[in-house]
Every structure is written in C-alpha cells, then in structure tokens.
Image: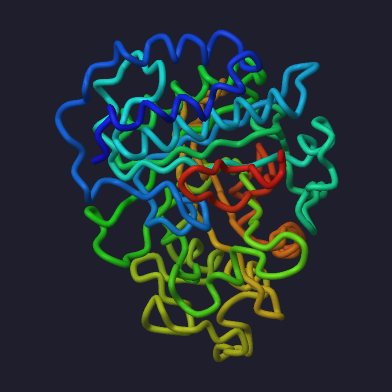
C-alpha cells in the first residue's frame, strides 16, 4: 500500500479549489496532519484499482454491498465550483479505494478495510445544462421516456450527480458514502440514497448466477467482462464520446405478498425458466438457449409469448449489462414488505435500455408482481490516469 506520507504533495491538487468548495476542503487540509497512520495494512487482494481508461465498479466483479447516492446542485453553483468539488471527491475515492484515509477523514481507522471498494461517478442529464456545458453532453444521452407501468416516487428519481459505492463490507461502504457526502454538500444536496445487497462468489461459487429476493436466478444471459463484444455492450467505441457509458438505476418494488401466493409451476411460466436450475422451459441447463418456437402437445408455446425471458430480448441482439442489487427496507405503511431490486443497467447507448423496457412495459407477465417506483439515468464518463480526475474532459 502507498505510504500516506509520500502522498502529502497531492494537497496541491486541491489548492485551486479550496475557496470554491468552502470550509469542507479547508478543514480537510487542516486535519490532514492529525490523521494517524492506518493500521492494520490493507491486503493487496482487497484493493480494486481506481485509475484506468474505464471507471471501476462496472466491469469489476460485483461486491456484496452497494449504495447509490444521487445529488442535486444547489442554486447558483458554477461549473468551476462544481469541478473543484468533483476533484476533491475523486481524490477521496482514490485514497479510500487504496486503503488510505481521505483528507479530513474523521474516522481514518476505517480506511484500511477496503473490501474491494469501488467508487463510480455519473452525471445527470440536467447537470450539463445547469452548469453551461451542454455541448459536452455525450452523444445519444437523453432522459428516459415515461412507461405505462411506472409508479415513480420523486424520492427515488432524478439527480445531477450519481455516486455508486460498492464493497464487500457494509461498514466500508457506509464510511465511504459519509466521507463523500460531507465533501459534496457545499455545492449539492442529497436527492436520494438506495442501499443494496447481493449474493457473492464466496456464497454461491465462482461464475454462479446470484438469486434475487424473488428467488429467481438473476443475470443468466448477462454479458461477462472479457468476453467478445462486452466492450461494445457497455462503452461507446466511436463517435464524439468514446469511452462513455450510460447507467439507468430503477428501483423496482417486488409485490412479495402476492408473489408468495403463486405456485412454483406458475412462477416458472411467468419467467420462462425453471426455478431450481434456471434452465429455460425448453432446455435442461441454465446456459441452454431458449427455443421460442417450441410448442407442446396442444400446439401452445412452451415459453409463453409474454414470458419475461421472451419480452426482455430484442430481435436485433442488442444487450445491456445488468449490475443488479436487492433491497429490503422497513415495512411499508400498509404492513407489507418493501423489498425488490435496485436495477442498475449499463449500456453504451441508452436507447438499448429504452427499447427493452418498452417490450417489458407492453406485455411482460411479470408486471403483475413488480412495480418501478424510482428511476434515474446518468452518463458515465471515462476513467482517469494518475494525476487526472474523473470528469476532467467535461470541465476543462
């Protein structure tokens, strides 16, 4: 791990922005020398690299815990002030993902427990207009249209800046979110925060598909990092915005009280897959390709025309990359469980998500048991190399 004392010159990275960000950064600089050396040392295999052409937290093997935090700009914030805070947030993320306390970290003892921590930044559609950088908005990025099944709550929708924090330890996630939120509040307020969890490799095994809170294997057909075509699914490769991606975050409430009452065979018909193995109803293994033309002895489709796996596919083969988490919050006011999915979808072109969602919106059998209650979309800028900062191409 990098020795903290060799990192002191990084304070100069923030010097130009101290006046802009107000007391938070100034306090951070004042507290820097009081932060003790972190112990115990961070284990190398728990550190995910912060620098690179792509931001971490996308192709990274999914961690067990995540918090998605969206912020809204305060009135009167300029592009220069925002950029100064963005540099500070990037510096926080670089330090914390490496097991080093952030500037002004009031709980530096937590910093060494990286637990494969990643921090990913995204920009809302309206941020580009509000800060006068609409000409830097990536090609093809646009707000999502309204969908018939949406029942959106403003408390889980929209936002100017998104920070996705993931790690294999919830304390590490909480500490990181707290640090970033403190350093952001001079120019932004928290719009919403969503906390999620998912099954991980130590629990389900290498390359196994996790199950969601509805009991279904979730992500069977997901593209895998490193496989042919993955980069084309997630990142723009050409045009005016190479290296950019888009992220859609949808909060989908599962109507568990009524789903619990559905018998197993009916659940399999709704999804189009077997509950135990995840195999399509026309196959034997989870990896088998569904045969949508197969019919039973009565001439009926084995996989119904409105089964979830049929409606979630585009005929032209375009795909999205799902990085989905579950949520389980306090019980709703009516006494029913408030749980479901934080559906995070990365794709090079947001129109791919829109086209898939339209198919689901029109005729997915699963719509009876799932309700979108939150929605937001963000443009994900490229990563940065050492000495740079995420978002630099937008604000310089």
Q: Quadrant of the C terminus?
A: top right
Tell me if residue 261 can be seen.
no
User: How many callouts does the rendering have?
Assistant: 0
Task: Work out whether residue 17 or residue 137 is closer to the camera in this orientation and state it.
Answer: 17
Query: Residue 140, located in which quarter of the rendered image?
Result: bottom right
Name which residue lies at 65% across and 57% down.
244
The reply to whether residue 19 is in sight is: yes
Q: Taking 296 as reference, is 331 above or below it?
A: above
Is 285 located above or below residue 235 in the figure? Answer: below
Q: Is residue 267 left or right of residue 189?
A: left
* In the rendered image, the vertical position of residue 385 relative to residue 111, given as above or below: below
Residue shown at the point (46%, 29%) measured from the top left: 329
Give how far across and how far down residue 201 sits, in percent. Answer: 27, 57
Q: Is residue 321 left or right of residue 126?
A: left
Q: Residue furthest left?
A: 40
Q: Is residue 392 left or right of residue 147?
A: left
Residue nearest the viewer, comparing 296 with 351:
351
Q: Quadrant of the N terminus?
A: top left
Residue 322's x, y, as percent?
Answer: 53, 58
Q: Residue visible at 51% across and 48% down?
A: 259
**Observer-nearest residue: 304 or 117?**
117
| Left or right of 13, for residue 359 | right
Identify the colour scheme used.
rainbow
Relative depth, front residue between 122 and 152: 122
Q: Where's residue 154, x and y in %?
A: 72, 28
Question: x, y percentage for residue 127?
Answer: 76, 35
């Amino acid at each position: 791990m990098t020795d903290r004392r060799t990192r002191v010159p990084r304070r100069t990275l923030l010097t130009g922005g101290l006046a802009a960000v107000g007391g938070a950064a100034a306090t951070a600089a004042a507290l820097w020398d009081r932060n003790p050396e972190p112990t115990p040392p961070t284990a190398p295999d728990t550190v995910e690299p912060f620098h690179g052409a792509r931001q971490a937290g996308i192709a990274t093997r999914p961690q067990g815990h995540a918090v998605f935090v969206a912020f809204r700009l305060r009135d009167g914030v300029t592009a220069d002030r925002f950029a100064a805070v963005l540099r500070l947030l990037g510096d926080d993320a670089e330090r914390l993902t490496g097991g080093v306390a952030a500037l002004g970290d009031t709980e530096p003892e937590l910093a060494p427990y990286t637990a494969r921590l990643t921090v990913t930044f995204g920009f809302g559609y309206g941020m580009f207009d509000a800060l006068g950088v609409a000409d830097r908005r990536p090609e093809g990025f646009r707000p999502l249209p309204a969908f018939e099944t949406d029942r959106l709550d403003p408390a889980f929708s929209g936002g100017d800046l998104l920070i996705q924090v993931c790690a294999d330890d919830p304390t590490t996630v909480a500490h990181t979110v707290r640090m970033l939120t403190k350093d952001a509040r001079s120019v932004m307020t928290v719009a919403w925060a969503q906390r999620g969890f998912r099954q991980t490799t130590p629990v389900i095994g290498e390359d196994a598909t996790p199950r969601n809170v509805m009991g279904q294997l979730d992500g069977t057909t997901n593209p895998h990092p490193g496989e042919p075509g993955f980069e084309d699914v997630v990142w723009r490769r050409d045009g005016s915005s190479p290296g950019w991606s888009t992220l859609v975050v949808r909060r989908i409430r599962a109507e568990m009280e009524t789903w619990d009452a559905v018998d197993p065979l009916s659940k399999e018909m709704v999804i189009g897959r077997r509950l135990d193995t995840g195999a399509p109803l026309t196959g034997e293994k989870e990896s088998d390709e569904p045969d949508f033309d197969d019919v039973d002895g009565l001439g009926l489709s084995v996989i119904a025309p409105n089964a979830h796996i049929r409606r979630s596919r585009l005929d032209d083969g375009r795909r999205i990359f799902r990085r989905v988490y579950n949520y389980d919050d306090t019980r709703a006011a009516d006494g029913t469980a408030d749980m479901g999915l934080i559906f995070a979808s990365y794709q090079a072109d947001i129109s791919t998500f829109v086209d898939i969602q339209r198919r689901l919106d029109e005729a997915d059998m699963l719509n009876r048991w799932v309700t979108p209650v939150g929605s937001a979309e963000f443009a994900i800028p490229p990563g940065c190399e050492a000495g740079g900062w995420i978002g630099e191409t937008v604000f310089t």
